[in-house]
Amino acid sequence: MEAQLEKKLLMGFLLFTVLFLSGVRAWTGEIHGRVVCDVCGDSSIGPEDHILEGAEVAVLCITKSGEVLNYQAFTNARGIYTVAETMPESDRWDACLARPISSFHEHCTHLGEGSSGVKFSYTRPSGYSHTVRTFVYRPASVPTYCI
């Protein structure tokens, strides 16, 4: 496992070196967002709601050169997912679609209204990030304290 990581790091370093020496300007982009559980299903974030760790999100991007890139991300302990990429400026992201795939929380698995996906143009310069609006899941049944 450690040898595989070392091999990936070496390949990344070699790619970066080739790009740097060939004069190709590198571009770096980042997309991040949050996934939460709307416990009461009231479409507003309140003290009863919580983040969803381990929720899966897919991000599909089309580059300026027309290549389609598909990323898979999972939320961390703060409910945040991140996708980042470094590539030549000529191949940078042009437009992206972020969409929730699944929630592994046993009580919050139903996708909330308006959370099917977000399309956006990626116009940020190198080194900056784009924040996607929050994706919301709801429980199958609303707890009695919400009624």
Image (cartoon, rainbow, N blue to C red):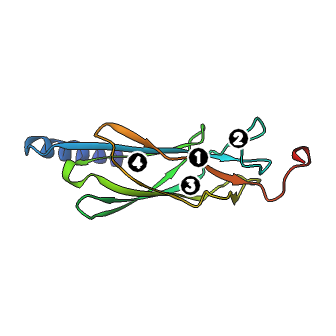
| Type of amino acid at the residue the image marks with label 1 | Thr
Which residue is label 2 attached to? Answer: 45
Residue 143 left/right relative to 19 = right
Which residue is label 4 attached to? Answer: 1
Q: Position of residue 83 (x, y in %)?
A: 42, 47
Q: Nearer the viewer, mark 4 or mark 3?
A: 3
Q: Nearer the viewer, mark 4 or mark 2?
A: 2
Marks 1 and 2: CB-CB under 8 Å? Answer: yes
The local crowd at label 4, few if under 14, some if 14 to 19, many if 20 or more residues have their Cα within 10 Å, is: few
The local crowd at label 1, few if under 14, some if 14 to 19, many if 20 or more residues have their Cα within 10 Å, is: some
- Lower sequence index among marks 4 and 2: 4
> Which structural element holds mark 2?
loop
Q: Position of residue 95 (x, y in %)?
A: 36, 57
| Type of amino acid at the residue the image marks with label 4 | Met
Q: Mark number for residue 134? A: 1
The local crowd at label 2, few if under 14, some if 14 to 19, many if 20 or more residues have their Cα within 10 Å, is: some
Which residue is label 3 attached to? Answer: 56
| Mark-to-mark CA distance, 2 and 3 | 20 Å
| Mark-to-mark CA distance, 4 and 3 | 24 Å
> Which structural element holds mark 3?
strand
- Lower sequence index among marks 3 and 1: 3
Marks 4 and 2: CB-CB under 8 Å? Answer: no
